[in-house]
Structures are given as C-alpha cells and as structure tokens.
Amino acid sequence: MFFNRKPKTQAEKLKELLKRKQGVKSWEIAKALPSVSPHRRLSDLKEQGWTITYKLMDDNKTKIYFGKPPKA
C-alpha cells in the first residue's frame, strides 16, 4: 500500500530531477523542494560526488541544471 512508503528526502527528489534528459530549471527546483535554500541541496550533492553542470537559457538569467551521479 502507498501508506508504507517512506517520504522522499529533498536530496532524493533533487536527484530524480537532475537525472532528467532535459535537465531541471532553477525555478523547478525551488518549486519541488520545500526549502529556503534549494541551491544548498545542489552543494550537498556535489559533496557526495555528483557532477552538477548548468546551461544558461536564451534570456541569460535562467539556468538549466544537469547532474551525473558518482561512479560506483
């Protein structure tokens, strides 16, 4: 049953978003994570060995983040 599922942590949610082929926009991260500092979660993943890159959109303001998990 769905009641037995453990709630996902902010890091787990962010990992799923970063694995998407199209990446994740900064505002999507802020919307998905109930955190005051969602960019700190990105730093946490970097400390865990993730490779986080970003690309600027045409407006030169919005960033699209991409992530690769550490090699096992």
Image: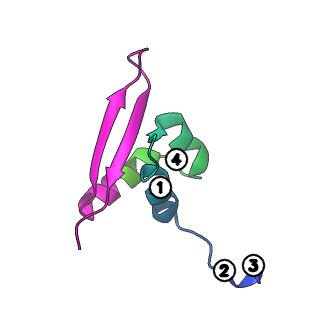
Find the distance from the CA under tag 2 to the CA under tag 3. 6 Å
| Foreground label between 2 and 4 | 2
Sequence-wise first label, 4 or 3 = 3
Residue 70 in magenta stretch: yes
Sequence-wise first label, 1 or 3 = 3
Residue 13 pos. (x, y %): 52, 59
Element at badge 2?
loop
Find the distance from the CA under tag 4 to the CA under tag 3. 28 Å
Find the distance from the CA under tag 1 to the CA under tag 3. 21 Å
| Foreground label between 4 and 3 | 3
Vertical side of 6 occupied by 42: above or below: above
Q: Which residues are magenta?
A: 43-72
Q: Which residue: 60% across, 43% down?
A: 31
Q: Is residue 4 left or right of residue 54?
A: right
**Residue wearing tag 3:** 2
Element at badge 3?
helix
Q: Which residue: 45% across, 62% down?
A: 11
**Residue wearing tag 1:** 14
- Residue 5 is tagged as 2
**Residues at discs 4 and 3 in contact (Cβ within 8 Å):** no
**Residue wearing tag 4:** 36
Find the distance from the CA under tag 1 to the CA under tag 4. 14 Å
Find the distance from the CA under tag 2 to the CA under tag 4. 25 Å
Sequence-wise first label, 2 or 4 = 2
Q: Looking at the rendering, which quadrant does residue 8 occupy?
A: bottom right
